[in-house]
Amino acid sequence: MASSTVEDYLKTLYAVHQSSGEATNVPIGRLASAMGVVPGTATSMMKALADAGLVEYASRAGVRLSPRGEQLALHVLRRHRIVELFLVEVLGLDWSVVHEEADLLEHAISDRVLEKLDLLLGSPRFDPHGDPIPTPDGTFEEPEWVSLATCPTGVRQQVMRILNQQIDFLQFVERQGLRPGAIVKVRSRDADADTSTILVHGRKAASLSLAVASQILVAAAPSPSA
C-alpha cells in the first residue's frame, strides 16, 4: 500500500493536471507550489515515483501520471470524496470544513470500509460539492457543465458543482443559497462592471462578480412539472 505522502502527491498531480485543461506535463514548480514544498523536495519525490512506475518524469519536460499512477490517484480521489459525503450526510459536519477532514481520513480507511461507506450512502455519483466520484474500477467522467459566468441568461439552471472549495468561499455560497441542487437564473450580466445578477429560487436576487460566478457550475434545470 502506498504511503500517505505518495498518495497526496499522486492526487495533487492529478488535480493540477486536470485544472490545467491541457495534455502537457505539469512543471515541477507548479506541483511543488500545490503541495506546499520547495521544488527540490518535489523533484526528489518525482524521481522516486518514476522509479516505482507511477509517474513519467523528465527534468525539463515536467511530470505526468503513468497509467498505473493515474489509477491509484483516482482511487485516492474516490476515498476522499466518499469520506466527504459521509461526513456531511451521516455525521452532519458542515460542507465547508470536510475537505481537510477527508484529507486526513482518506489514508486511514481500508478498501473494505470504503465500500461499506459507499453502500451506506447509496453508491453516490457526486460528493457534497458536486465533484464526481470515481467508480471502483477508476472510471471517471467530467460532466460538461457550464459556469454561471457563461451560461445563457434568463434560463432556469440548477447548481451542480462548486469549484472553489476554500472555507470562506463555501460559506459565502451557502449564504447566497447556491449549494448544489439550487435552482437559479442569471437575470443579467455586465462584463464591463464584472457583475452578474442571479435570481435564486425562493430568495432575493444576488449580485456576484464574474470571477465568483465562474466557480459555480450549472446545468439546465428540469422543468417545474418534471
Image: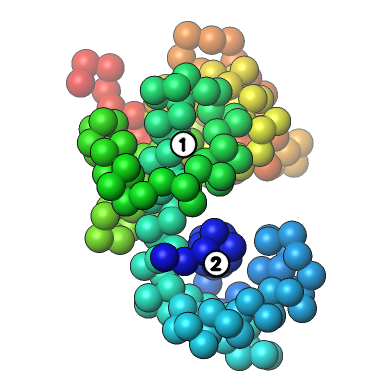
Q: Is residue 21 visible?
A: no
Is residue 79 found left or right of 33 in the rendered image?
left
Identify the mark at residue 8; answer none if there is no mark: none
Check disc 1 and report the residue beneath it: 84
Which is nearer the eye, 15 or 146? 15
In this view, the mark in front (2 or 1): 2
Q: Residue at x 46, y 36 (%)?
A: 84
**Comes first in the chain, label 2 or label 1:** 2
Is residue 26 found left or right of 128 in the rendered image?
right
Residue 59 picture location, percent across and down: 67, 90
Secondary element under disc 1, as helix, strand or loop, is helix
- What is the three-letter code of the residue carrying label 2? Val
Which is nearer the eye, 2 or 216? 2
Q: Residue at x 40, y 24 (%)?
A: 89
Q: Is residue 178 above or below residue 8?
A: above
Q: Which quadrant would the N terminus be assigned to in this image?
A: bottom left
Identify the mark at residue 6; answer none if there is no mark: 2
- The number of callouts visible is 2
Furthest-left residue in this view: 226
Q: Residue at x 32, y 42 (%)?
A: 113
Q: Say few, some or many: other residues with alpha carbon within 10 Å of mark 1 (under 14 / 14 to 19 / 20 or more).
A: many
- What is the three-letter code of the residue carrying label 1? Glu
Q: Say few, some or many: other residues with alpha carbon within 10 Å of mark 2 (under 14 / 14 to 19 / 20 or more).
A: some
Q: How is the image coloured?
A: rainbow
Q: Which quadrant would the C terminus be assigned to in this image?
A: top left
Is residue 11 found left or right of 125 in the rendered image?
right
Residue 142 picture location, percent across and down: 38, 54
Quadrant in which residue 62 is drawn:
bottom right
Residue 58 picture location, percent across and down: 61, 90
